[in-house]
Image (tube, grey):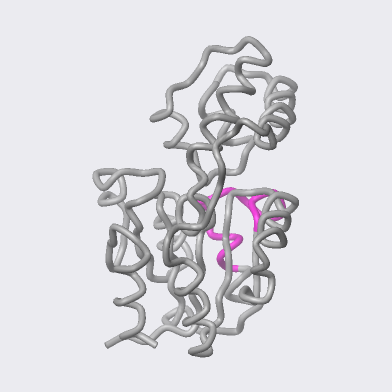
Amino acid sequence: MKKYRLVVFDWDGTLADSTGRIVYAMQAAARTHGYELRSEWEIKQIIGLELGKAISDLWPHMLPSQVAEMKVAYSHHYQDEIAPQVSLYKGAINLLNELKTSELLLAVATGKSRRGLNAVIDEMGLEQLFAVTRCADETCSKPDPMMLNQIIDVSGISRDAVLMVGDTSFDLDMAANAGVDGVALTHGAHDNARLAKSPQVASFANLAEFHKWMMERI
């Protein structure tokens, strides 16, 4: 049975149940600037991408200046008091602590900004859990493998002992592009049908199922 030494997690939709807040902020930003609204399903399809690319994919005819305005508005509305609350999925803390105790290296590769990821990790008191983190605004947007390659380079772990865990096809395709295994979680942004089209070694409905599988591979 294959053993892993480095587990890289996506953040939104994988560890954090933040889909509702992302949808809210994107729709609120569109209303702010009078752009046509995109549906919840449409917005879920771009979760995981760098924010500017996500906006450009949703509104392909926007000028760069309009994308920049939308980025500012999105970031503002993400902090609205009425926005849906973000919390870690059930079992996330136990999973991370047990993997850490088992001497695995843990990392995060996310489409969030560095400022956004640092804020949420600090707020939740998780800064000691992750050896390396990379964000799309300091590397390249998924599925480009740059952020995952950088994490692997810093860790010094062989690629055959690295596992990427995510809830979108972008995560799984990034893993394949970097030459590492990918695991799909179906509780996040992309549905089973879309996830099934991307390379993966396993798929799970929740973190508890993944936790059980993972403990056999460390």
User: Which of 113/162 is in front?
Assistant: 113
Q: Quadrant of the C terminus?
A: bottom left
Q: Residue at x 29, y 57 (%)?
A: 205
Question: Does 62 lie within the magenta span?
Answer: no
Q: Is residue 154 above or below residue 120?
A: below
* Quadrant housing the N terminus: bottom left
Residue 193 left/right relative to 27:
left
Q: Up-down: is 44 above or below 197?
A: above
**Corner quadrant of residue 214:** bottom left
The residue at the point 35 percent across, 57 percent down is 185
Residue 198 location, x and y as percent? 32, 53
Count of labels in the image = 0
**Nearest to the observer: residue 154 or residue 92:** 92
Q: Residue furthest top?
A: 34
**Where 215 falls versus 26 (above or below)?**
below
x and y percent of residue 181 in the render?
A: 38, 70
Q: Residue furthest front?
A: 82
Answer whether residue 148 is magenta in the image.
yes
**Residue shown at 45% from the left, 74% from the top:** 95
Q: Which residues are magenta?
A: 135-149
- What residue do we see at 63% from left, 51% from top? 140
Image quadrant in which you'd find residue 155: bottom right
Percent coordinates x, y for residue 178 in the rendering:
48, 66
Relative to residue 50, is residue 171 drawn left or right?
Answer: left
**Residue 115: image location, x then y, percent:** 75, 51
